[in-house]
Amino acid sequence: MKIASIRTHIVGEVRPFLFVVVETDDGIQGIGEAGITWREQAVAGYIEALTPSLIGEDPRRIEHLWQVMLRSGFFPGGRIGAAAISAIDIALWDIKARSLGVPVYELLGGLVRDRVACYPHVADNAVDVMVEDCRRLVADGWQFVRFNLPSQGDQLEPRVSVRQGVELVTAVREAIGPDVGIIIDAHTRLDPVDAVSLCRQLEPLNPFFVEDPVRCENAAAIGRLRQHTSVPIAMGEQYATKWEFREPIEQDWIDYCRVDLCIAGGLTEARKIAGWCETHYIAIAPHNPLGPVSTAACLHLDLATSNFAVQECARIPGEVLAELFPKQVPFKDGYMYAPKEPGLGITFDESAVSKYAVMEGDCPRLHRADGSFTNW
Ligand SMILES: [Mg+2]
């Protein structure tokens, strides 16, 4: 079996998506997805640069090809490169499992759980509306809710956002009781001084975790925060490859690992990161604001990984890109279930690509009161 062609598709619905189709000379197709949103053209260019190294190679040698993709240019692939590698890697796992007639999770060690608990996104809104949204989600079966640290429209003043965030978590906790997991995503919007304030005030409200309380470039900032709060901390959605995860894991700076399979390096790299986490009793909670391939890849990893906590599920399977992916993974009442079909267990109708136009625009932006840029 040899890789015969690699095709990239950038499409849009609600947000941009990049999918890659890897096809073999005996007609098996694998599907992958990359995760650096709003920079899809750069990732597509990296995939194009990798393609000559892959055509004619045996797609079942996934680990070997991963090493070639990351290291063959001499300069190790960065975040854009790792996203490109992620997409191809996921497609290779899909091909390998299809060629053997088994679901991907069977190649990852088999099922360790019956179902995968998920959390949805609660949209930014007035507190009373968000509280009602959380109540409804819990009534629908979800055991977790997740929302952003508030901004003030397109302005974010940290001290105001910290106060609003504490008020929001307080109101939601009061509404949904003590047992539902509350996740607040600070989305790298705070510096350590304000993150400490937020986390300490949230401690009595028992959030499941506070996500990305600080920016990711200097991982030691999480260590500084760690010294000041007992609140569980989750990070990692912006990290590429195991090397960026090494220090936060080894230093016990994080409680939950937010590995993104479409950025970190695919299933190959995410399994290694999950194994590294296991030695520190850190559970994975994979990042997944993306499309049906990301969701499926996360599900297979979660099903086969002992140290798994909860799965982000921003879009319920089947509710996005429905014509492009006629078959998506099983979902019911806040949980995903194991697909029975070979490969990732999803189908891709390439003829439907033209129905999902490429989206114009860029990532949303926030500013401080003085007009300066601050993270969205
Ligand atoms: Mg996040």
Image: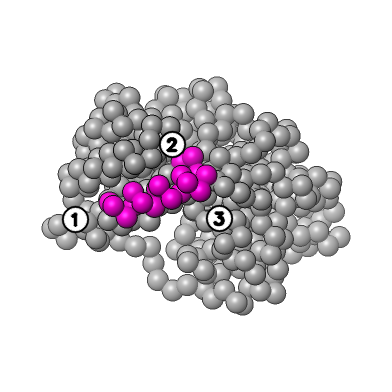
Mark 3 falls on what kind of element? loop
Between marks 3 and 1, how big is the CA–CA gap? 34 Å
Between marks 1 and 2, how big is the CA–CA gap? 33 Å
Residue 327 location, quadrant: bottom right
| Mark 3 lies on residue | 316
Q: Nearer the viewer, residue 80 or 375?
A: 375
Q: Quadrant of the image for the N terminus? A: bottom right
Q: Is residue 135 magenta?
A: yes
* Residue drawn at (20%, 43%) of the image: 163
In the rendered view, tell whether residue 166 sits above or below residue 34: above
Does residue 219 appear anywhere in the picture? no
- What is the three-letter code of the residue carrying label 1? Arg
The x and y percentages for residue 201 are 24, 32
Tag 1: Cα neighbours inside 10 Å, few (<14), some, or many (≥20)? some
| Mark 1 lies on residue | 368
Q: Which residues are magenta?
A: 127-144
For marks 3 and 1, give the one nearer the viewer: 3
| Mark 2 lies on residue | 180
In the rendered view, tell whether residue 143 sits above or below residue 87: above
The x and y percentages for residue 22 are 72, 60
* Residue drawn at (54%, 76%) of the image: 357
Q: Are marks 2 and 3 in contact (CB under 8 Å)?
A: no
In the image, 60: left or right of 143? right
Q: Nearer the viewer, residue 3 or 36?
A: 36
In the rendered view, tell whether residue 130 sits above or below residue 43: above
Mark 1 falls on what kind of element? loop
For marks 2 and 3, give the one nearer the viewer: 2
Residue 303 location, quadrant: top right
* Residue drawn at (28%, 28%) of the image: 204
Q: Earlier in the sequence, mark 2 or mark 3?
A: 2
